[in-house]
Image (cartoon, rainbow, N blue to C red):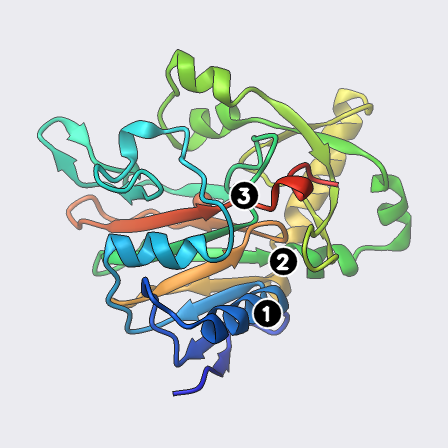
Amino acid sequence: MAIQVTRQLAPSFGAQLDGVQISSNSDDSIIDAVRSLWGEHKLLLFRGQQVSEQDLVDFSRRFGELEIHVRTEYLSPKHPEILYVSNIKDGDKSIGILADTEVGWHYDQIYLARPAVGSLLCAVQLPDEGGNTYFADMAAAYDALDSEIKQKLDGRRATQSYEAFNRAYSVPTNDAQKKRSPDIDHPIIRTHPVTGVKALYLCPGMTTRIVGLDEAESRDLLDFLFEWTVRPEFVYVHRWQPGDCLMWDNACTMHRRDPFDQRFTRLMKRTTILPPPELATPF
Ligand SMILES: [Fe+2]
């Protein structure tokens, strides 16, 4: 079956694709088509997937080198390229990150020097309700800004903090992990390393400060931008179904998750796709 876009997910971005099975031996023609649709739509939904961990790793790797997540305690025991997002426990030990609470708006790994350009997240076990994932189109949000604000942001950088995110939504990192993820500054307006699209590269969950502005001015501008970027016209809410996988462009969309009742179990498996080394540093 040929690849087809069967549904636009939101006015400015997101597409459901039919005709793709995430697998270890997808044809080059499928991969090329997915790559191009991924750039065009920023968020792709694949439904009805049956994906082994090997499939997930092999398929993801066709789009770039894979990141081994800094939270090594939550990696798949057999495939360290896969991060478990889950509230399931093995005895006292959580097998995955982020449990059942709300997860605030963030870009995956914006706090690294070479942040990921993509993530592929597959549902394995889902709660009966809750745990929806929201995406914001940060390129559309940038485009719609007044030119005066665009000018104000032009050339500016902001500080990204994994520690701030963990304080609000997760558990602390250990000392070795802290060393791997210190606060870092990136451009606020990011040019996509592959498509060239410009997007707001900041997020309420991890962006703490605009560099070079005094504290109050930084706070005011960030508050304005955080509210602006999550206006309904820029946001898509995904209600997961069994067999769903979502692949997002992590250079121009951010996401958040609703909490869910702890009596349910939820297990999601994620790979994280890096940009080419020569385009590693956000610009
Ligand atoms: Fe995330």
In the displayed structure, does residue 41 sit left or right of residue 196?
left
N-term-proximal mark, 2 vs 1: 1
Is 227 on the left-hand or right-hand side of 180?
right
Q: Verify CB contact (< 8 Å) between mark 2 and mark 3.
A: no
Place of residue 44 in the rendered image (x, y in percent of width and height, measured from the top left): 48, 67
Query: Mark 3 belongs to which amino acid?
Result: Ala
**Residue 116 — which label?**
3
Residue that mark 1 sits on: 36
Q: What is the distance, in whole Å, between disc 1 and disc 3 at their CAs? A: 18 Å
Camera-side residue of 224 and 85? 85
Using a 10 Å C-alpha cutoff, classify the residue at mark 1 as few (fewer than 14 neighbours), some (14 to 19) or many (20 or more): few
Q: Which quarter of the figure has residue 82? A: top left
> Amino acid under label 1?
Ser
- Where ligand 1 lies, by image quadrant? top left
Q: Quadrant of residue 213?
A: top right
- Which residue is depicted at the point 69% across and 50% down? 193
